[in-house]
Image (cartoon, rainbow, N blue to C red):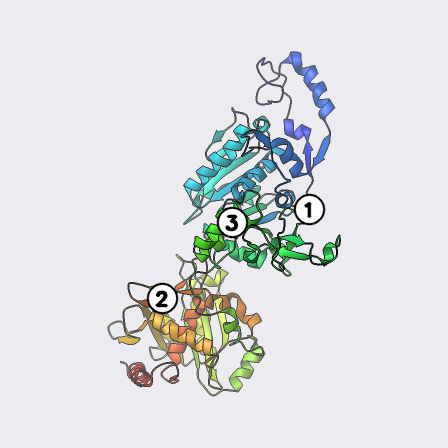
């Protein structure tokens, strides 16, 4: 637990001896009268010591909320919210709250804002939400409302200090700055902060997060508090939760299982769908009632080992555990809400409503544990095949979240084997560096044919054509209206039906008979995750299943593999994937156009 040291000297600031009869003794922005100086100094001497207290002690003494029954202000109640104690007291510098709706998520952010700004002089908080409306609502309904209804908070935030929608200043020179960022984070540039609070984190673009957090790069604190209600498996909050957080869950015991007084023998419930009973919360084993505020209920970490530098203290808060839950209303939601909405807004869990063409296990089943992307293994692979080597390139775009990907493939034992992949990042994103390295790969591996993305690389494609000629560089462009495969003589490109070709490749991977990828440890990130970033949706207008990329993910490796597979197709037709009649026509057409100049 964190202990916050409050130094009275820093909190009250310097004493000024200039005369001002109307100034209160605690306001150093106004001078203190000479006649009162001795009395003030004596008072300060009596207070000049360091007090140590927990954030929850501060909140219990300072923060007040109206009682829903009496409508009178009362101290913040931890007895009915035992789960919130650790969230307020955590000593972690990185906090992630993945919550349902209406569980005091924004209130928690507001309280933590006051904990930091009141107890740490000159402390700066930058609050960010996706929209102007959300930021204004937080400023008015959470920060301003608490300040006006809690008399003690007005000591730190008196009326004469800066107080507008986007900036709040405290008397100890701490401040809360409020901004919003949706398509870009330009409004957060140039600001400095000790803590970054991001609300509705699920709607923030991943590319904007480093820009926002850069505001705390010069601070010794570098606190981060991210909160939101999850949506699909691919939004930012789920990615942080699953890959970089402790994934703490509220565990509620059922003493009926095990020995009385021995918690180690009890059954512990992680609150979820199985705990929803007809009259209240029930044990998922015996179906008997359980109490979410049981004296022994506690947070438990459910995540495996994580890199210490990337750990967020993560907490999931479903509506099942909050004291104001109306159970008949919750049951009505369970009955009437769409599945995804109930999982997101009531249970605080991510849920994919769209279908995934590939599962992680299906992809892993195509990975060869002995196929490592090392020089020794690659040399061994090439010794075992007489098949030509093919390459696929998907060009990255500066204006979108994408990277240039190069894959090298060949047929080994009848399987299209991807034995090497490279993503161009950092300095390699410079076009001339990419081109030189790609040319080197093509020459060193004597690549027979390279399938490239027509739409994303006009300049680099032209360079490769000049260097290697059109018999080795095949340009492919996706279309949603063309036939499966059609050659455009005017532009010397192949137009392929995007969704049909992707469907063919996905089915080939699912069959486990066509493709072979490197071992999962080498392939998982970023290449494997690219293949898993695509979901399918049925288009009512076109009456076709379409494939789309998740907003905050990349899928470049998938398209590089597709282009390599298409480049190899004329010499390696696969009748099990495409109807024989169509396959023969396509193979003949492609061979004629590639080798005879079209």
**Which tag, 1 or 3, sits closer to the chain's start?**
3
- The residue sitting at 51% across, 36% down in the picture is 142
Residue 77 is drawn in which quadrant? top right
Instruction: Please tell me which residue lies in front, 128 or 275.
Output: 275
Label 2 SS: strand
Separation of residues labelled 3 and 2 (CA atoms): 30 Å
**Cα–Cα span, label 2 and label 1:** 51 Å
398 or 243: which is nearer to us?
243
Q: Tell me if label 2 and label 1 are in contact, CB under 8 Å.
A: no
Q: Identify the residue shown where x is 72% and y is 32%.
A: 50
Give whichever of discs 3 and 2 has the lower sequence position: 3
Kindly identify which numbered label has been placed on residue 295: 1
Look at mark 3 in the image and give the residue it sits on: 100
- Relative height, residue 421 to residue 157 (above, below): below
Residue 186: percent from the left, percent from the top? 43, 45
The relative height of residue 573 versus residue 537 in the rendered view (above or below) is below
Q: Residues within 10 Å of mark 2 (few under 14, many from 20)?
A: some
Residue 123 is left or right of residue 404, and the answer is right
Asked which secondary structure carries label 1, the reply is: loop
Mark 1 Cα within 10 Å, few/some/many (few <14, many 20+)? Answer: few
Which element is circle 3 on?
Answer: loop
User: Closer to the N terminus: mark 2 or mark 1?
Assistant: 1
Residue for badge 2: 546
Quadrant housing the C terminus: bottom left
């Amino acid at each position: 637990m964190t202990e916050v040291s409050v130094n009275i000297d820093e909190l009250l600031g310097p004493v000024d001896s200039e005369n001002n009869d109307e100034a209160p003794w605690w306001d150093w922005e106004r001078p203190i009268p000479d006649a009162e100086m001795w009395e003030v100094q004596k008072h300060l001497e009596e207070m000049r010591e360091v007090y140590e207290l927990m954030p929850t002690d501060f909140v219990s003494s300072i923060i007040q909320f109206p009682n829903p029954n009496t409508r009178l202000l009362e101290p913040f109640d931890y007895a009915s919210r035992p789960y919130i104690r650790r969230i307020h007291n955590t000593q972690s510098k990185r906090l992630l709250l993945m919550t349902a709706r209406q569980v005091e998520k924004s209130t928690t952010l507001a309280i933590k804002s006051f904990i930091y700004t009141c107890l740490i002089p000159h402390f700066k908080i930058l609050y960010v939400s996706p929209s102007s409306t959300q930021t204004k609502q937080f400023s008015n309904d959470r920060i301003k409302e608490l300040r006006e209804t809690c008399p003690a908070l007005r000591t730190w935030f008196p009326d004469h200090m800066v107080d507008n929608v986007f900036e709040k200043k405290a008397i100890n020179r701490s401040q809360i700055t409020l901004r919003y960022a949706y398509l870009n984070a330009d409004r957060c540039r140039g600001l400095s902060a000790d803590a970054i609070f991001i609300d509705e984190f699920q709607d923030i673009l991943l590319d904007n997060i480093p820009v926002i957090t850069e505001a705390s790069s010069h601070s010794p604190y570098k606190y981060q508090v991210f909160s939101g209600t999850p949506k699909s498996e691919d939004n930012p909050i789920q990615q942080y939760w699953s890959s970089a957080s402790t994934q703490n869950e509220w565990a509620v015991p059922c003493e009926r299982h095990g020995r009385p007084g021995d918690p180690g023998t009890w059954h512990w419930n992680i609150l979820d769908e199985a705990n929803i009973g007809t009259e209240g919360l029930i044990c998922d084993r015996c179906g008997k009632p359980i109490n979410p505020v049981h004296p022994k209920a506690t947070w438990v970490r459910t995540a495996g080992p994580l890199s210490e530098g990337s750990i967020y203290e993560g907490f999931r808060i479903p509506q099942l555990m909050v004291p104001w839950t109306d159970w008949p209303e919750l049951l009505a939601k369970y009955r009437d809400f769409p599945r995804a909405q109930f999982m997101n807004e009531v249970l605080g869990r991510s849920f994919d409503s769209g279908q995934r063409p590939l599962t992680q296990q299906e992809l892993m089943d195509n990975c060869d544990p002995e196929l490592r992307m090392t020089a020794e293994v690659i040399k061994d692979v090439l010794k075992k095949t007489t098949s030509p080597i093919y390459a696929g390139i998907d060009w990255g775009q500066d204006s979108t979240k994408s990277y240039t990907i190069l894959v090298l493939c060949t047929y080994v034992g009848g399987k299209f084997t991807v034995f090497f992949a490279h993503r161009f990042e950092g300095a390699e994103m410079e076009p001339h560096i990419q081109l030189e390295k790609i040319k080197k790969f093509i020459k060193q591996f004597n690549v027979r044919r390279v399938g490239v993305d027509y739409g994303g690389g006009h300049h680099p494609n032209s360079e490769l054509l000049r260097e290697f000629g059109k018999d080795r560089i095949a340009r492919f462009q996706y279309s949603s209206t063309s036939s499966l495969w059609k050659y455009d003589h005017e532009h010397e490109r192949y137009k392929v039906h995007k969704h049909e070709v992707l469907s063919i490749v996905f089915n080939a991977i699912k069959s486990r008979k066509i493709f072979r990828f490197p071992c999962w440890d080498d392939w998982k990130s970023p290449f494997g995750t690219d293949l898993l970033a695509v979901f399918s949706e049925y288009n009512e207008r076109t009456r076709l299943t379409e494939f789309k990329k998740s907003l905050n993910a990349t899928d470049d490796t998938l398209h590089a593999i597709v282009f390599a597979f298409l480049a190899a197709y004329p010499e390696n037709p696969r009748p099990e994937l495409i109807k024989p009649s169509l396959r023969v026509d396509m193979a003949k057409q492609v061979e004629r156009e590639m080798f005879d100049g079209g």
